[in-house]
Image (cartoon, coloured by chain):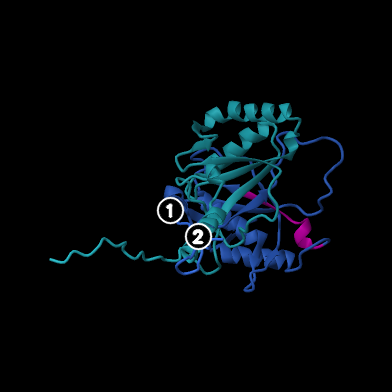
Amino acid sequence: MKIHPKREMPSADTDMTPMIDVTFQLIAFFMFVLQFSDAETNERIRLPASELAKPAEAPLAQPITLQLTKEGTVLYAGEELALSRMRPALQRERALLERLKKSISDATIIIRADAETKTGMVQELIRVAQEVGFEKFVMRAMHREEGDK
Amino acid sequence: MKIRKTGSGAPDKVEQNMTPMIDVVFQLIAFFMFSFKVAAAEGDFSIKMPLAAPSAGQPTQDLLPPIRIRLTAGPGGELSGIRMGERGLPNFNALHNEIIGIVGTQSGPGSLAEAAEVELDVDYNLQYRYVINAITAVSGYAEPSGRVVKLIEKIKFSPPRQPGAQ
C-alpha cells in the first residue's frame, strides 16, 4: 500500500471584513436608537393620544415625572405611592432642588397619567404639587396621526 | 552572501483568530436587539393652574372671561355630555368648531386666540382621555402638511369636584 506523506489541508480563507463592517453598523444603529429614558416610562401607563402631542423642541429645565396609574397610585422614583403619600415625596423633591440652589418655579411637573385614570385624581395630584409650591405643569400625551382612532 | 529563496515571493500571512471578537459582537447585537423598543412620540400640553390663593393687588389684565367647558361623566367614567357655557355639544369636533367660531383661525401675538382662556370643569370620575380630547379640540389642529395651528393655549382647570358629585 502506498502511503502518501502527510500534507497540510488547504485552508479556506474568507474575508471577514464586510461581515464585521455590517455587524458594527448594526451595533451603532441599536446604540443610537436605544432609549435611555426608560426610567421615566412605564408599561403600565397607557397615555391618551392626541394629534397635537408633538415632542418638545427643547428639553424641560427641571423635569419631575409623576406617573399616575388608572388605579390612582403614583409611580415616582421607582416606587408606587398612594396619592396621600405624594406630599412628603414632593417636599423631599423641593428640598433637593433648594439644596441644589435651583428655583422651584423653574421645575416642571410632567404628568403621565393613564388614559383611563379618573380626572379627579389627576387634579388632586396637581393640587398636592401646587400646595408644595410647584407652579408649572404639563400633561403628557402620545402622538396620534390624524385619522387614527 | 546567501540569498534565501522564498516559495511564492509573498510575505508570510499573520493569522488572527477572529472568533472571540465575532462572538462578542454578536452578543452585543443580540443585547441591543432585545432591548430595542419602538417608542411612540410623546408630547406635552401646558396647563395653567390657578393659584390656591388669589393674589391681591392689580386686577388681571385679561379682558375676556374664560370660556367654560363642562365635561360630565356617565357610568364607568365614559363621557356623557359636553357643554360650552350653557350650550350642549354633541362631540369634540363640534367643540372645536365652536372654538374656531369664537377665536377665528388667526393665532400669534395680538390675536384673539392668544388672549382667550379656557376653563375645564370636569367630573371627578371622567376618564382622563376625554380631558386630553377636550384640550386637543380647544388648543389647535394639525394641518394635512403636519403643521400645528395653535388656537387657545391658556387652559386651566376648575377646582376638582368631589367623587360622585355631578
Horizontal and vertical percent position of residue B131: 57, 52
Q: Magenta stretch: give its range.
A: B111-120
Chain B pictured colour: blue
**Camera-side residue of B86 and B54:** B54
**Camera-side residue of A78 and B91:** A78
Tag in front: 2 or 1: 1
Q: Can residue A46 be seen at all in this image of the molecule?
A: yes
Tell me the CA gap for discs 2 and 1.
22 Å
Residue bearing mark 2: A26
Query: In the image, what residue occupies the spot 56% across and 68% down?
Result: A146
Q: Which chain carries label 2?
A: A
Q: Which chain carries label 1?
A: B
Identify the element where label 2 is drawn.
Answer: helix
| Farthest front residue in view | B1
The amino acid pointed to by label 1 is Asn
Same chain check for tags 2 and 1: no
**Camera-side residue of A34 and B134:** A34
Q: Which chain did the image draw in cyan?
A: A
In-image side of B23 versus B136 (left or right): left
